Amino acid sequence: MTATAPSTARVRATALLPRLALVLAALLATLFTAATPATAHAALTASDPKDGVVVATAPAQVNLSFSEQVAMGGDSIRVLDPQGKRVDTGELRDLCSGSIIRYGTALHTGLPNGTYTVAWQAVSADSHPVSGAFTFSIGAPSQTSVSLAGQEAGGGPVGVVYDIARYAAYGGFAVLVGAAAFVLLCWRRGAAERPLQKLVVGAWVTLTVATLAMLLLRTPYTGSGNFADAFDLSGLRAVLETKTGASLVSRLLLLGAAALFIAVLFGAYARSQSAAAGRPKVARSSGGPNGADTAKDTNDLAFGLGIGGAVVAAGIAATWALSEHASTGIQTGIAMPVDMLHLLAVATWLGGLTALLVALHKIPDIEREAVQRFSRVAFISVLVLTVTGVYQSWRQVGSWSALTGTSYGQLLLVKVGLVAVLVTIAYVSRTWTTRLAETPAGKSAKVVSQRDVSRETESVTVPADPKRAAQLARQRAARANAREKQVRDADSDRVGLRRSVLAEAAVAVVLLAVTTILTSTEPGRTAELEAGSTSADTATAVPDRAVKISLPFDTGGPAGKGTVRLELDPGRVGANAVHLWADTPDGQPLDLPEVKVAFTLPTKDIGPLPLVPERAAPGHWSATGVQLPLAGEWRIDVTVRTSDIDQTTVQKNVKIG
């Protein structure tokens, strides 16, 4: 029996398949390490009263300040007494002013002494829920029975399902956009191929179902954490009024337009491609009586699909850019279009590569020109990914010091090192793949040809007993698999490729683990700013020299902004004199209705030691004989009142002794 070598096109397609599988593995690792957005959730930056403070009298309200805009409701701030009973009025007060993000809630009057718990929950501007809790005491600390364990926002089973839906939506978007782009830009005849049609339709279904799931789960995800609340109509109505809810609804509407695009792509356009492929070769090349008109109609339809598809794809990408990380932080006007380009480039590359792999696996007669065209499209996508990825990294890290001095930056360096290792292994894998692609036809003839398989199948007599027939079929399949494994193991090039791909997979697993930690780590830019703020909150007294500090304040009312300058002289253990000056933003003296000062040494449970300085001149107050009994890090709280209802407390830590 003479063995017939496979056709040249099939040999080339078979040789390209390992290379594309290799690229897909590297792409998945790169996607999870480079394209995953870093966490940029809002953080609680200040509170009044502060965490752990002991106040002499009950405050009238509790105020919380955040690093970025948040969405809060009536129950977002809860204040509980030592027995766990709510003592707040449930009325949320919006105290935001300019760049200051502050919310508060009023407390009931006549609160007894003891330790009170403040539990808060909000939704960041990047759509992620955040929550936390702290305590303060009135008069003196006490035992408390309040337990807030297991109430973290966005966690639990609902959080797991929501995250799965989120990643399924990203995957569906990538395959939907990339596979459609592959058909229109690289292989138009693929519109008539059933495997590619199933791939695109499956991606559309995945994205649609994931978006619906996120919309329904939004209420329990940002609130109670109970699946039953997914069908709460009032909660759904509230979600639709948020930026995230509007983005999800917009995505569903755009997916309706995408369904029309798919229908035309795999309907009229696929029929035109089938008709073009069915014409004689001479007629197709010369145009024929109707060939030119048919080709023109096909090109016009392809152009219209390309423009319409690009608009729909950009719109869907914008639903992420306008509602998540790119919409918060610095340079949002640049970050949002950059994020759209990043998502579209990822989709074109990953989804197109997926479509090409499906075509090579199930459609053996794919033209080599289609692979070459996709190579050019992928190269452009990689360039866009590189430029947008560098910008996104800079936006999250911000400085060289944050790159080396924060946990986020250090993890990013580890990730870059792992990517370098991955690229090195990928280069080795590419060498093995090139050798396989250049394998002579004679060497490939070792593989059993399709004609041989057909002859072997025809020579086998099928028994009448169905069980016996099934047994013989399994035996033939086992023999075929054994022959393929024998040939594969005898080829040193294939063995080398398998080993290098295995090494790539191991590195990719580590990269995925590092990225998982990275996404839950505070961005370097934010961490550095908070570190700078913390260090700025602490001053060290110099012997025989007065301590001088400046404290900007904003009470939120009219003419409520300014700066308090405090001087503690001589700034040591024992008696000290205190002078305060209040200035307007333009440096003019600000005569405030009331200024109060308190000194607290938390490490020794001393304080707060209240002080009401006397007015010495407009915008100037002073006091003498202020006793600081012990050395340590004292916290100085300055309460500023600019009207009958507008006041705030600012603080600074000073090391004495």
Image (cartoon, grey):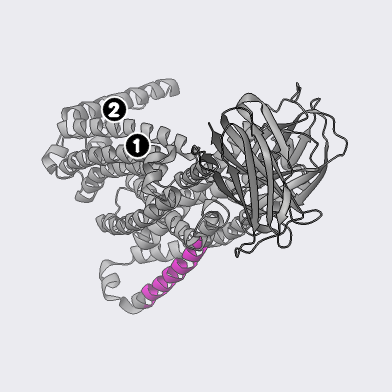
Residue 414: image tag: 1
The residue at 23%/39% (across/down) is 424
Magenta range is 293-314
The residue at 20%/27% (across/down) is 489
Screen quadrant of the N terminus: top left
Q: Quadrant of residue 368?
A: bottom left
In-front residue for pair 458/493 = 493
- When the figure is inspected, residue 466 is found, relative to residue 30, above or below; the finding is above
What SS does tag 1 mark? helix
Task: For marks 2 and 1, give the one nearer the viewer.
Answer: 1
Q: Is residue 319 magenta?
A: no
Residue 236: image tag: none
The overriding secondary structure of the stretch rendered in magenta is helix
Q: Is residue 298 magenta?
A: yes
Cβ atoms at labels 2 and 1 below 8 Å apart: no
Q: Please give the count of numbered marks on the rendered protein.
A: 2
Rendering coords of residue 322 (x, y %): 56, 58
Q: On the image, numbered disc 2 is attached to which residue?
A: 481
Residue 494 shows in this picture: yes
Residue kind at label 1, given as amino acid type = Val
Residue kind at label 2, given as amino acid type = Asn
- When the figure is inspected, residue 273 is found, relative to residue 610, above or below; the finding is below
In screen coordinates, is 430 left or right of 45? Answer: left
Rendering coords of residue 414 (x, y %): 34, 36
Q: Say whether disc 2 or disc 1 marks the residue closer to the N-terminus.
A: 1
- When the figure is inspected, residue 568 is found, relative to residue 189, above or below; the finding is above
The residue at 53%/40% (across/down) is 538
